[in-house]
Image: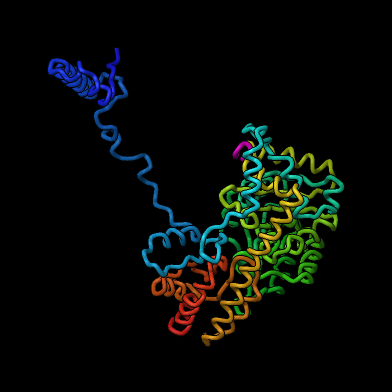
Amino acid sequence: MRPQFTSPDAHSSSPAFSSSSSSSSSDRRLNALVRHLDSSAMDPNNNSSISASPTSAHANSVFAHVVRAPEDPILGVTVAYNKDPSPAKLNLGVGAYRTEEGKPLVLNVVRKAEQLLVNDRSRVKEYLPIVGLADFNKLSAKLILGADSPPIQENRITTAQCLSGTGSLRVGGEFLAKHYHERTIYIPQPTWGNHTKVFTLAGLSVKSYRYYDPATRGLNFQGLLEDLRSAPAGAIVLLHACAHNPTGVDPTLEQWEQIRQLVRSRGLLPFFDSAYQGFASGSLDADAESVRRFAADGGECLIAQSYAKNMGLYGERVGALSIVCKTADVASKVESQLKLVIRPMYSNPPIHGASIVATILKDRDLFNEWTIELKAMADRIISMRHQLFESLRAKGTPGDWSHIIKQIGMFTFTGLNSEQVAFMTKEYHIYMTSDGRISMAGLSSRTVPHLTEAIHAAVTRVA
């Protein structure tokens, strides 16, 4: 029979436990149990799972050969920042919005939507379908393509709720690896660091096309066109819908039209990554224009959406993958295969974040409030661009810094090299990725002078 133990508090409250005879009896029983456990652990014929030393039988871990992986180049910036005790430290690496006071922001409209959900006693926590919340999917497609979009009107688009933008890209990549005849995807150089890993592990072969011109700190448009012309017919092309990460450099509408014509004439398959709709310019429609042009021309395309930035739902991991097809029948078949990709990956998506988005998108008042808050975030970032540019110009910092106000979105590609970045981190406690990308959302009017001093010192003292 297994020994029965009671808590010391229970023993101390019992008069019987205070007697010396009871105490001695308890001590004897405990000593006997310890001797029993010791002898059992030393008996080679004993099959008991109890061991005096859990690690003694396995001194060498079966994972001892595993090497420590390097920090993620983006997330690692925050790790280093958090370890720095300096009161002057500044984190410009994180891709998350901050207020003028440097604090994370939860939108008022998000709090309202959450309160409505909490107060709705009819809501339950049952599993969602494999492709997610139906209202969320329908409204997400409408948001990116527009209510009058031909694919929506003709029911030839399928949308699946996924785990933010990253999950949407991964599901789309795996679907293409299984069902598309060309397994090469061309991504811009440079691009978000996770793109290569996501598509490679999804089963695609990743190549790049020229995008950024370091000399002008703008778009290498001719190089882009030449590389896409040279891509094999049918190749997949990743396009940033707006606010290109990490450069902040976007094509003009006229350039987008040339890209569209080239992509269609070469039979390339466009895959849009839309992480910043409304967050770049402050206009949901303007930031979706590139995608809408492709969706309206009768051709097919894929679109990954994220609500991390434009609704501040970073931790909720809310996103969608939409695939525009030629016919409604093809769209239905595509959806059936998307389910087979998602089911063994994460089975079905979470409900809370998608419910927040759907609540906001389907309510006219909440939607309007969201657009106001969204424009305020975009406007603050634009203001930071102008303040930094004017500050560098007033300081007389060598070089042309006009690219700071020409670029758009959360990030600016400063043109600083890795040595200058390391200098700024060491001497000024300013943290950013080694390629010189800074998050404008991490700046404030208070910290612009500090960043200006650091950039000026880096440019004038470090080659």
Q: Work out whether residue 431 or residue 51 is closer to the camera in this orientation and state it.
A: 431
Which residue occupies 58% across, 52% down? 314
Magenta: main secondary structure equals: loop
In the image, 298: left or right of 435? right
Q: Which residues are drawn in magenta?
A: 345-351
In the image, 251: left or right of 327? left
Which residue occupies 84% across, 41% down? 329
In the image, 11: left or right of 129? left
Q: Quadrant of the N terminus?
A: top left
Which residue occupies 57% across, 68% down? 440
Position of 171 relative to 124 (above/below): below
Q: Report if residue 424 lies within the magenta region.
A: no
Which residue occupies 29% across, 32% down? 54
Position of 463 relative to 191 (above/below): below
Q: Quadrant of residue 35?
A: top left
Q: Report if residue 350 lies within the magenta region.
A: yes
Q: Work out whether residue 367 or residue 166 is closer to the camera in this orientation and state it.
A: 367
